[in-house]
Image (spheres, rainbow, N blue to C red):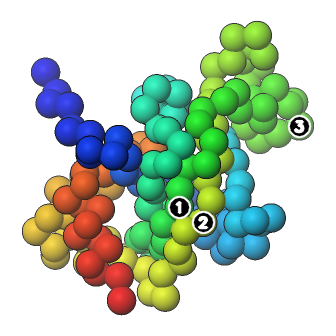
Amino acid sequence: MKKKAAIPANNRRYWLFKSEPSAFGIETLAKAAQQTAPWDGVRNYQARNFLRDDVSVGDYVFFYHSREEPLGIFGTMEVVRAGYPDHTAFDPKSKYYDAKSDPDNPRWIMVDVKLMQKFDSPITREQLQQEPTTAGMLVLKRGMRLSIQPVTTAEWQAVMKLVK
């Protein structure tokens, strides 16, 4: 059985959200109204379950750029709206459309995030691999494609120490 991570005393949890910068990068979030945007288009059941059941208002999130070099953490966000139905699943014109998703019983969930900090330089995969506390992060595991991933308090603190 998987060991459940301890929840910090203030009930804040830590996460890593992955996105391809050409689809939605940290620059896009920085230019959004009030630097806030929905995190939509998640189409993996385990990631959806995290958004639906675990991600809460006040949680902190690393913004990770995937698939395009350099891979790494480019900043931090705060969850400002808890999970709610992802309306893109109901829009036939959306690339995230899901004909089987029912507005009365939505299959997909999104949250709203607000930019907290855009790093001057990204914390790269190589840096994460070299730091003992972060070397075990899920994002570094071979074959890990999950776009929403839990981060431990120790991993969060270690990454933040790497930010210059």
Asked if the residue under mark 2 is in contact with the one under mark 1, i.e. CB atoms within 8 Å, the reply is: yes
Tell me if mark 3 has few (under 14), some (14-19) or many (20+) residues whose alpha carbon lies within 10 angstroms of its own. Answer: few
Q: Nearer the viewer, residue 33 or 28?
A: 33
Q: Name the residue under label 1.
A: 77
Which element carries disc 2, helix, strand or loop? strand
Residue 105 in view here = yes
Query: Against 71, is 18 above or below?
Result: above
Q: Which of marks 3 and 1 is in front?
A: 1
Give how far across and how far down residue 108 sits, in percent: 63, 27
Q: Name the quadrant of the N terminus.
A: top left
Which residue corresponds to the image point at 87% horizontal and 30% vertical from the top-left?
92
Q: Say which quarter of the image contains residue 135.
A: bottom left
Q: Which of 17 and 158 is in front in this view?
A: 158
Q: Upstream in the sequence, badge 1 or badge 2?
A: 1
Q: Mark 3 points at which residue?
A: 93
Which residue corresponds to the image point at 49% horizontal and 38% vertical from the top-left?
56
Residue 67 in view here = no
Q: Say which quarter of the image contains residue 73.
A: bottom left
Three-letter code, disc 1? Met
| Distance in Å between CA atoms under marks 3 and 1 | 28 Å
Query: Against 17, is 161 above or below?
Result: below
Q: Which of 61 and 11 is in front in this view?
A: 11
Furthest residue in direction front, as rendered: 10
Which residue corresponds to the image point at 26% horizontal and 40% vertical from the top-left?
7
In the figure, is residue 142 to the left or right of 113? left
Give how far across and how far down residue 67 sits, in percent: 50, 63
Q: Mark 2 points at which residue?
A: 115
Tell me if mark 2 has few (under 14), some (14-19) or many (20+) residues whose alpha carbon lies within 10 angstroms of its own. Answer: many
| Distance in Å between CA atoms under marks 1 and 2 | 4 Å
Which residue corresponds to the image point at 44% horizontal and 61% vertical from the top-left?
62
Asked if the residue under mark 1 is in contact with the one under mark 3, i.e. CB atoms within 8 Å, the reply is: no
